[in-house]
């Protein structure tokens, strides 16, 4: 296995915090490592203290593998600076202390889009199950031998593959009402909608274009931009985050989503996405958003 020295990084907090990687990756029982698919390869990453060890099975070369690990876990982010920017109050300071080292992951835009289409009115366990069933049903099967062990896994299904399926087909795997959105977006992304072009777009312009897709509203668009494109100014607001924000920052008063967004932008700026992740996960742990 290859190694990278890391600081202010915790793989368990990162992977278990309901980000796209957590929806289709498998966390090791000791909580110190994860296995996930990347293109036609299987990647293993394991943390021991301040060292992240990683390896792969498949065709990915060493330089690309290192770049994938650094990009996926945003290992180049200045977390000391991030913590200074978002640690503006006692709630955030306690969240940072509890989940110290939790990073925002940067995932493939298509994988992120599919995961968050499925996330609507859903919980993490069910999202993970639906995504895994879609991967098994429609991903391309891969097999590699290592020693006396044969590894088998399925790659993430492409838009082209899912576009061949009807909403009825997708509902079999638990997608429910989201199946019609998956069908529509898969067709769009395999035919005319270029997800890659959004990398060069400004946050507001990219969000506007994403919301042209069926089933992509404010929250889903912000999730895609944050976890798929690394636009950390995005501040996704679901019902849970809204309730936590209202209780912690607005003395329990009901606030419009646009007002919460404005507050987050003014308070945390380019680091609003990081702030959101710590607010979301801390709120869940304390049961504030129920």
Image (cartoon, rainbow, N blue to C red):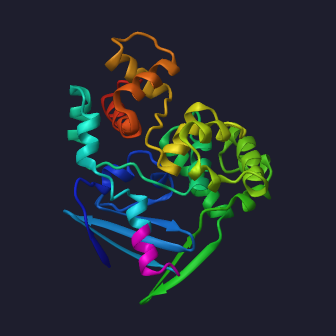
Q: Is residue 244 above or below residue 164?
A: above
Residue 75 is a magenta residue: no
Location of residue 93 in the rendering, given as x and y in whole percent from the top left corner? 21, 33
For residue 54, what is the image quadrant?
Answer: bottom left
Residue 62 is a magenta residue: yes
**Image quarter of the N terminus:** bottom left
Which residue ends up furthest to the bottom in the rendered image?
147
User: Magenta stretch mostly in which secondary structure?
Assistant: helix
For residue 44, what is the image quadrant?
Answer: bottom left
Question: Residue at horizontal 51%, vertical 80%?
Answer: 58
Question: Residue at horizontal 64%, vertical 36%?
Answer: 208
| Residue 81 seen by the camera | yes
Q: Is residue 104 above or below residue 255?
A: below
Residue 138 located left or right of residue 203: right
Location of residue 5 in the rendering, given as x and y in whole percent from the top left corner? 24, 67
| Residue 100 seen by the camera | no
The number of numbered badges drawn on the structure is 0
Residue 264 located left or right of residue 214: left
Give the magenta range. 59-67
**Image quarter of the C terminus:** top left
Location of residue 20 in the rendering, given as x and y in whole percent from the top left corner? 49, 51
Residue 107 located left or right of residue 218: left
For residue 285, what is the image quadrant?
Answer: top left
Q: Toward the viewer: 129 or 179?
A: 179
Q: Toward the viewer: 115 or 259?
A: 259
Question: Residue at horizontal 45%, vertical 48%?
Answer: 19
Q: Toward the viewer: 22 or 126?
A: 22
Residue 198 located left or right of residue 42: right
């Amino acid at each position: 296995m290859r190694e990278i020295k890391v600081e202010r990084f915790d793989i368990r907090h990162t992977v278990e915090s309901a980000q796209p990687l957590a929806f289709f990756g498998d966390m090791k029982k000791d909580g110190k490592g994860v296995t996930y698919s990347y293109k036609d390869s299987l990647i293993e990453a394991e943390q021991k203290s301040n060292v992240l060890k990683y390896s792969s099975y498949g065709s990915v070369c060493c330089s690309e593998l290192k770049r994938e690990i650094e990009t996926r876990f945003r290992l180049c982010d200045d977390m000391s600076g991030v913590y200074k920017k978002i640690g503006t109050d006692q709630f955030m300071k306690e969240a940072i202390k509890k989940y110290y080292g939790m990073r925002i992951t940067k995932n493939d835009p298509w994988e992120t889009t599919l995961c968050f289409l499925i996330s609507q009115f859903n919980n993490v366990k069910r999202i993970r199950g639906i995504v895994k069933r879609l991967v098994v049903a429609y991903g391309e099967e891969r097999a590699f031998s290592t020693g006396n062990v044969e590894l088998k896994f399925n790659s993430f299904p492409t838009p082209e593959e899912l576009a061949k399926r009807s909403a009825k087909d997708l509902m079999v795997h638990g997608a429910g009402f989201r199946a019609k959105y998956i069908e529509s977006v898969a067709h769009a992304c395999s035919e005319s909608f270029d997800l890659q072009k959004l990398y060069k777009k400004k946050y507001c312009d990219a969000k506007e274009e994403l919301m042209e897709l069926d089933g992509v509203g404010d929250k889903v668009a912000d999730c895609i931009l944050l976890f798929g494109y690394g636009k950390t100014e995005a501040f996704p607001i679901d019902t849970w985050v809204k309730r936590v924000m209202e209780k912690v920052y607005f003395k329990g008063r009901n606030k419009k989503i646009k007002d919460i967004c404005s507050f987050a932008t003014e308070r945390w700026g380019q680091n609003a996405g990081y702030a959101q992740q710590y607010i979301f996960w801390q709120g869940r742990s304390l049961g504030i958003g129920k």
